[in-house]
Amino acid sequence: MNHSNSMMSLNSHPHTIYISNNDIICGKGPVTNNMVGNRRYCVLVDLHMHAFKKAVSKIERETVARSIVHTVRQSVPSGKFLMLDVDSGLWTDVGDDKATANTLKELSVRSPPAPTQIRLVTPRTARERRGGLPRAA
């Protein structure tokens, strides 16, 4: 089987799976962060951040996440969301629902929290704390 230089193989006994530059390895850590597909995925997440922040309902936020998953799936070659099954030792595609859930999580993590209201508290004088009444002698 002839694969281009842009593909990498993951040995997964007894099978070998070929990873393209459009595939996302699900998980955390430096290995996944350095995969080309994962870096492209981060760019897609960043590009959709504005739409995610504007979304007011859970359905709208999920639509943004599904759009990212759809973009990965429609890449040429088609992108996969892969996870290692530790029991079998095989790499499997997590499917669209899990990929969407992971994408929603990623969007939420990258989205800064809404600004909070800050109330400045100034030092009050002793007179103000007493209600402006003069001090008894």
Image: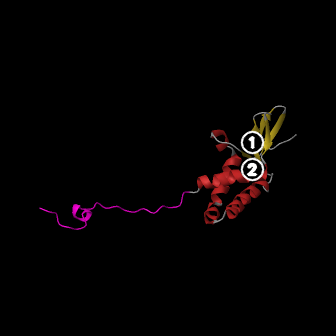
Image position of 1 (left or right of 105): right
Q: Quadrant of the N terminus?
A: top right
Give the residue drawn at x 53%, y 61%: 114
Residue 96: x and y in percent read 78, 53
Identified by mark 2, the residue type is Lys
Which residue is the extreme one toward the right?
1
Query: Residue 3 appears in which quarter of the rendering?
Result: top right
Give the residue drawn at x 20%, y 67%: 133
The overriding secondary structure of the stretch rendered in magenta is: loop
Q: Nearer the viewer, mark 2 or mark 1?
A: 2
Identified by mark 1, the residue type is Met
Residue 18: x and y in percent read 80, 41
Which residue is the extreme one toward the left?
137
Give the numbered dot on residue 98: 2
In this rendered view, identify the residue nearer to me: 28 or 1.
28
Q: Earlier in the sequence, mark 2 or mark 1?
A: 1
- From the image, tell me which residue sits under label 1: 83
Which residue is the extreme one toward the bottom?
132
| Helix, strand or loop status at disc 2 | helix
Asked whether disc 2 touches disc 1, contact meaning CB atoms under 8 Å apart, the reply is yes
Give the numbered dot on residue 104: none
| Protein image colouring | secondary structure
Query: Residue 59 appears in which quarter of the rendering?
Result: bottom right
Vertically, is 12 above or below 108? above
Give the residue drawn at x 63%, y 40%: 29
Vertically, is 41 above or below 121? above
Residue 24: x and y in percent read 72, 47
Report how far apart the C-alphas of labels 2 and 1 lie in the structure. Answer: 11 Å
- Magenta part of the chain: 112-137
Q: Quadrant of the C terminus?
A: bottom left
Magenta span includes 125: yes
Residue 35: x and y in percent read 69, 44
